[in-house]
Every structure is written in structure tokens, then in C-alpha cells.
Image (tube, rainbow, N blue to C red):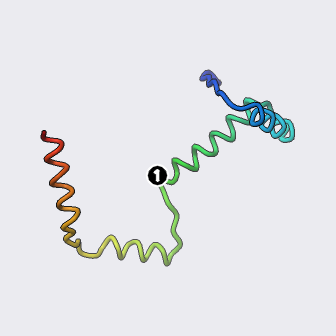
């Protein structure tokens, strides 16, 4: 059951384009916007929770994870500066 509501402020041109596309897809404007926004939200969020690799890419990824850590003086300095700023 749909219970959440969103209000959008968009240009007349975008509104007309969305209405034409919804009509062409045979769905209501609300359904069209909800489906399109939901699909884009899934795409954006998927980039932050999962990624897909073929077998060769997976092997390279695992090799990078398994390699010994390197000392990065610049990163060490940045971490120390952050600690100073946070503790202030």
C-alpha cells in the first residue's frame, strides 16, 4: 500500500516530457516518476553496496587485498592532523 507522498518542483518542460513518457508507457505520471526514481535510486545505491567482477577482475581484486600493507607517510600525516583537529 502506498502511503508516502513527495512533492516536486520542476519546470514546465520537464513536467510535459514526463507526462508524455508516462502516457507512452501506459502508466500514470505518479507511477512513472516512482518507477524511474526508484530505478535510479537502486543504481546509485548499488554502486555503494556491491560491485560485479568477472573472474579475471576478481583475481586481481583478491591479489590487491592480499598484498602487504604499504607505509604511506602522507596518509599517516593526514590521520595525525585529523586527530589533532578532532581532539581540539
- Residue 39 spot, x, y in % from top left: 64, 45
Q: In front here: 52 or 7?
A: 7
Residue drawn at (73%, 29%) of the image? 30
- Residue 23 spot, x, y in % from top left: 85, 36
Q: Secondary structure at mark 1?
A: helix
The image shows residue 73, relative to residue 22, as above or below, that is: below
Name the side, left or right, on which 31 lies relative to 63: right
The image shows residue 62, relative to residue 43, as above or below, that is: below
Name the side, left or right, on which 72 lies relative to 11: left
Give the quadrant of the C terminus: top left
Q: Count every numbered label the image shows and give the total.
A: 1
Name the side, left or right, on which 40 lies relative to 47: right
Callout 1: 10 Å neighbours few (<14), some, many (20+)?
Answer: few
Residue drawn at (42%, 76%) of the image? 60
Give the quadrant of the N terminus: top right
- Residue 4 spot, x, y in % from top left: 60, 23
Residue drawn at (19%, 71%) of the image? 71
- Residue 79 spot, x, y in % from top left: 19, 55
Identify residue for label 1. Answer: 48
Name the side, left or right, on which 62 lies relative to 70: right
Residue drawn at (21%, 69%) of the image? 72
Amino acid at each position: 500500500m502506498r502511503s508516502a507522498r513527495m512533492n516536486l518542483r520542476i519546470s514546465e518542460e520537464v513536467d510535459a516530457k514526463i507526462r508524455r513518457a508516462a502516457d507512452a508507457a501506459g502508466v500514470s505520471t505518479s507511477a512513472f516518476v516512482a518507477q524511474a526514481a526508484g530505478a535510479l535510486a537502486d543504481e546509485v545505491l548499488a554502486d555503494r553496496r556491491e560491485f560485479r567482477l568477472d573472474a579475471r577482475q576478481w583475481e586481481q581484486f583478491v591479489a590487491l587485498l592480499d598484498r602487504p600493507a604499504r607505509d604511506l607517510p602522507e596518509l599517516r600525516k593526514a590521520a595525525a592532523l585529523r586527530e589533532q583537529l578532532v581532539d581540539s
